[in-house]
Each structure stands twice: as C-alpha cells, then as structure tokens.
Image (cartoon, rainbow, N blue to C red):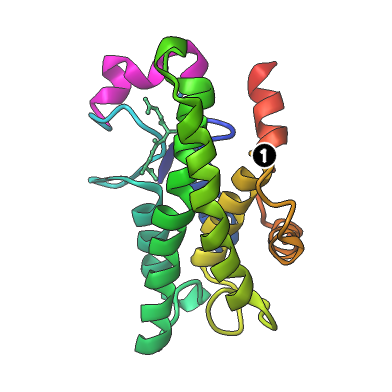
Amino acid sequence: MKLYEFGPTRSIRARWALQELNIPFEAVTVNMMKGEHKQPAFLAINPAGKLPALVDGDLVLTESMAIIIYLAEKYPEKGFIPADLRERAEFYKWIMFTATELEQPLWRIARNTNLYPEEKRQPTDVEMAAEDFAPMATVLDGHLHGREYVVGDHATVADFALAYTLDWANEATLLGDFPRLQTYMMRMYARPAAPMRIATAFARAMR
Ligand SMILES: N[C@@H](CCC(=O)N[C@@H](CS)C(=O)NCC(=O)O)C(=O)O
C-alpha cells in the first residue's frame, strides 16, 4: 500500500489508521508547500489535487474518511470498525458528524485565515464558523461524558479521525471551553501507534 501524504494535513487520519493496524505501507510525501499536489504526477492519482490518497493494488482511494473506513473493513479482525450493526450505524454517524459538523467550520476558518488570497478572506465567516463549531462541540462533549471511546468500548477509526479533528480545533483555539474534549484527544494521542500532533508535523514541514 502507498499513502500519499503531507505532514499536518488530513493525511494524518489515514496514517493513524495504518499505524494502528500495524500494516506495512510506503509513505510518499507530496510537498504542498512546493505545490506538488497540483502537479500532473499527483493529479493523475487525485484529480482534485488534494491529500490524502491511498493506493492499494489497483484501487486508488481518496477522501480521508473513506480511506480509514476501507482500511478498518479490510482488516476487520483488528476491531477498528464495530461488528454489530447498531454500533456500526453509530460509528458512521460520528464519522459524518466529525466531517460535517466539526471539520467544516474548521475548514472555513483555515481558508479565511490562511488559504484564500488575502483580498478574498472574510473575517466575519471566521467568527461565524467559530459560532457554528461551539454547539456541535457541546453535543460531542455531552456524548463523551462517561465514555472512553466515541462508539462502543474500544477504539475505532472514528476515534482517530475525531481526535485529529479535535487537535485541529485546538490549533484554532476552539477547545478552551471543552476540557473533556481535550482529555479525550490527549488520551487518543497517547496511544503507542498515534501519529504526530498537528503542531509538530507542521513544524517539521516548515524545516
Ligand atoms: N474531504 C477531503 C479533503 C482533502 C483536503 O482538502 N485536503 C487538503 C489538505 S488537509 C488539501 O489537499 N488541500 C489542497 C487544496 O485544497 O488545494 C478529505 O477528507 O480527504
């Protein structure tokens, strides 16, 4: 398997799943700082020019959440996707919640603070995105009360995706009012197979 990745990006989700599954993979760095994700060599793998991408034989898979679900399903004996249908439904729910309710406001903030050309950035959307994030974080906070994992009684790839997303929220200084979410995130990152935190990966990428 080959993982096309770049330090602090959503490729951390895929790397986290691969490391936890303990399966060998080849890591291919696509240097976004140098614009390699928009070069023909990478566009042939992902025409969207976005990371991560996973290549497994003749399967080329993009979308970080699809990648981690695929990996968990490919190795069900590792237990990173619930076997029980109802638990699996909850698992899908929290992955969707992470991508839509938590990540989207973070993405709006990132685009309007760093990624869009300066003249197109909307400071009001940064504020609104932070306002959108808070009630959804409150919902998650309530759900995690008395729980160690987002679904069931052991870790699934939903936890890894969620912990990465909370680390992103932490970088955006949005976790201050949510000590339980911070504790949960730190617990996930304390796992032996956890990847680098975003800040560390970012610092390395800047070297
Ligand atoms: N929904 C996609 C988003 C992928 C994505 O936007 N990745 C960012 C890095 S975190 C990227 O490659 N951005 C380059 C661009 O948008 O041009 C996923 O979860 O994989």
The image shows residue 127 at horizontal and vertical percentages of: 54, 37
Three-letter residue code for mark 1: Glu
Farthest residue toward the front? Answer: 124
In the picture provided, is 71 more to the left or to the right than 126?
left
Task: Indicate the quadrant containing the C terminus: top left, top right, bottom left or bottom right.
Answer: top right
Mark 1 sits on what residue? 171
SS class of the residue under badge 1?
helix
Q: Quadrant of residue 21?
A: bottom right
Magenta stretch: includes residue 33? yes
Q: Is residue 145 visible?
A: yes
Q: Is the residue marked by circle 1 packed among few (<14), some (14-19), or many (20+) residues within 10 Å?
A: some
Magenta stretch: includes residue 205? no
Which residue is painted at 47% across and 45% down in the image? 105
Q: Quadrant of residue 58?
A: top left
Q: What residue range appears in magenta?
A: 31-45
Ligand 1 is found in the corner quadrant, namely top left
Is 78 above or below relative to 38? below
Is 100 above or below relative to 153? above
Is 48 above or below relative to 100? above
Count of labels in the image? 1
